[in-house]
Image: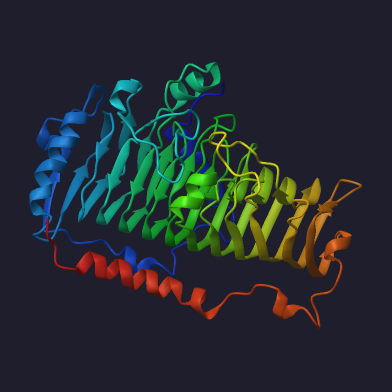
């Protein structure tokens, strides 16, 4: 097991990013919503007895501080300030109209005692824990049914100290599914920005059943062999904007999800209007951007641009299987730079873990209208492994202006795929050879006016949530 990441590693990563000309910079799209919210009431965690020595457990201090600040939720909201120090804690809940602010040298540390991470019910769209039947450990920072919540700071750090959880997982000694680092459920008007997240026990940032979410200017790190440490996983959520992030983890950098098999089909809450811009990162066991494999509630209207993935397993993946049902449609990915990536584009239709034996094997996913354009890549092993499902062809897959330097003698491997291409090198597989132009441009998904305006709608909605009258 490689060691967990430290703040020294973070500084090295930030120094590396400084040498990439187009890398993380101030956003012009979402920054209006991220102006510092002026909360009329503010307290420091030290006022509630917290000790930042990295040893004292401060769960009660966080819980008591937030309980106190709840009295101001109808008076303009409040800010909880975490100063420099190492603040060990178990899981704690957030409240509406709250800003959790971490100072530059503040580090919130997750306890390595599983009793400090309570067990909660499984998500209804999953039917059980992702890893084990039954419940799941609650995330370190948790909230549900919230409005107007901001987690931010001056590049402070939230460290899940996940190595103990990774070891338990590998030894198969867990009783419940591992916890996320941050999970917000059924919430709206969420902003997570200007922080570093380290060593999550499981997925790092998990907005589930949420709307109007911004994740901006965050760094997420976990060792390359840390299991399932996804970066950001929007799950059955809509109007999500992810911008200006650096992610290096043991699994997918971003994975868009919407529930698992019959539970996701029944819950029927899709992920839609997901915008991803200026993402840099790498991994050895996952993808830069993944959709699925839990996508049974549907995923649509995904727009991703200005992506840079290096030294990675896969750049872009759609994962699904028989029994998933649901759909993935209207996906538009452009301006992608790849260096040292094993597989540039992958459609995996055999990703078949199921929650139980009650799924319907005849529930076939609908995969259609996927457009990927303006991709360049050097030292790529395989251009594309695009595998649909027999009797369930993936339709209207469009590849445009793709130039890859590929080391494999068989750059493309396609089956049960239908679509079109133009200006693709190396030459694409037979099912995609028919030209987009002049007859099939209307068959290829392009950015709709609705999606173009969704960032503006997102900014307006969050601003309104922050400004609406506060009430308990």
Front-most of 300 and 215? 300
Front-most of 385 and 294? 294
**For residue 42, side relative to residue 282 (left or right):** left
Front-most of 393 and 311? 393
Image: 291 above or below 463: above
Q: How is the image coloured?
A: rainbow
Residue at point 70% right, 42% down? 350
**For residue 467, side relative to residue 259 (left or right):** left
Residue at point 32% right, 57% down? 190
Count of marks overlaid on the render: 0
Residue at point 78% right, 59% down? 417
Image: 244 above or below 469: above
- Location of residue 113 in the rendering, given as x and y in whole percent from the top left corner: 33, 20
In the image as oriented, which residue stretches furthest toward the bottom? 438
Image quadrant of residue 436? bottom right
In the image as oriented, which residue stretches furthest toward the right? 409
- Location of residue 282 in the rendering, given as x and y in whole percent from the top left corner: 61, 44
Quadrant in the picture for the N terminus: top right
Image quadrant of residue 116? top left
* Residue 447 in view (yes/no): yes
Quadrant in the picture for the C terminus: bottom left
- Location of residue 127 in the rendering, given as x and y in whole percent from the top left corner: 45, 39
**For residue 200, side relative to residue 279 (left or right):** left
* Residue 427 in view (yes/no): no
- Location of residue 290 in the rendering, given as x and y in whole percent from the top left corner: 60, 50
């Amino acid at each position: 097991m490689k060691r967990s990441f430290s703040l020294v590693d973070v500084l090295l990563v930030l120094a590396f990013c400084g040498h990439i000309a187009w890398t993380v910079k101030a956003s012009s799209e979402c920054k209006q919503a991220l102006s510092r919210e002026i909360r009329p009431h503010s307290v420091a965690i030290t006022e509630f007895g917290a000790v930042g020595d990295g040893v004292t457990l401060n769960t009660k201090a966080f819980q008591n501080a937030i309980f106190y600040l709840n009295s101001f939720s109808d008076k303009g909201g409040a800010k909880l300030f975490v100063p420099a120090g190492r603040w060990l804690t178990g899981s704690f809940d957030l409240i509406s109209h709250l800003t959790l602010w971490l100072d530059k040298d503040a580090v919130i540390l997750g306890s390595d005692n599983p009793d400090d991470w309570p067990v909660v019910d499984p998500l209804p769209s999953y039917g059980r824990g992702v890893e084990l039947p039954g419940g799941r450990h609650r995330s370190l920072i948790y909230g549900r049914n919230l409005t107007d919540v901001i987690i931010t700071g001056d590049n402070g750090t939230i460290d899940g100290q996940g190595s103990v959880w990774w070891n338990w997982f590998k030894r198969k000694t867990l009783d419940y599914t591992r916890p996320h680092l941050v999970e917000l459920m059924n919430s709206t008007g969420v902003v997570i920005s200007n922080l570093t997240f380290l060593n999550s026990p499981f997925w790092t940032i998990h907005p589930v059943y949420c709307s109007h979410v911004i994740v901006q200017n965050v760094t997420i790190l976990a060792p390359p062999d840390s299991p399932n440490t996804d970066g950001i996983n929007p799950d059955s959520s809509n109007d999500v904007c992810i911008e200006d992030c650096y992610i290096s983890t043991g699994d997918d950098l971003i994975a868009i999800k919407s529930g698992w098999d019959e539970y996701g089909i029944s819950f029927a809450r899709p992920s839609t209007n997901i915008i991803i811009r200026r993402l840099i990162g790498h991994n050895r066991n996952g993808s830069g951007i993944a959709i699925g494999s839990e996508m049974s509630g549907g995923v649509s209207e995904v727009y991703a641009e200005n992506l840079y993935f290096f030294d990675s397993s896969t750049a872009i993946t759609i994962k699904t299987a028989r029994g998933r049902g649901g759909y993935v449609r209207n996906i538009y990915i452009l301006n992608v730079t790849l260096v040292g990536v094993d597989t540039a584009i992958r459609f995996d239709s055999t990703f078949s873990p199921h929650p139980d034996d009650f799924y319907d094997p005849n529930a076939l996913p609908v995969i259609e209208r996927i457009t990927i354009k303006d991709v360049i890549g050097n030292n790529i092993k395989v251009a594309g492994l695009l595998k649909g499902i027999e009797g369930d062809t993936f339709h209207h897959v469009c590849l445009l202006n793709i130039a890859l330097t590929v080391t494999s003698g068989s750059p493309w491997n396609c089956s049960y795929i239908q679509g079109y291409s133009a200006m693709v090198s190396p030459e694409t597989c037979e099912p995609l050879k028919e030209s987009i132009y002049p007859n099939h441009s209307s068959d290829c998904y392009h950015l709709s006016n609705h999606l173009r305006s969704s960032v503006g709608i997102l900014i307006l909605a969050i601003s309104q949530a922050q400004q609406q009258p506060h009430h308990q």
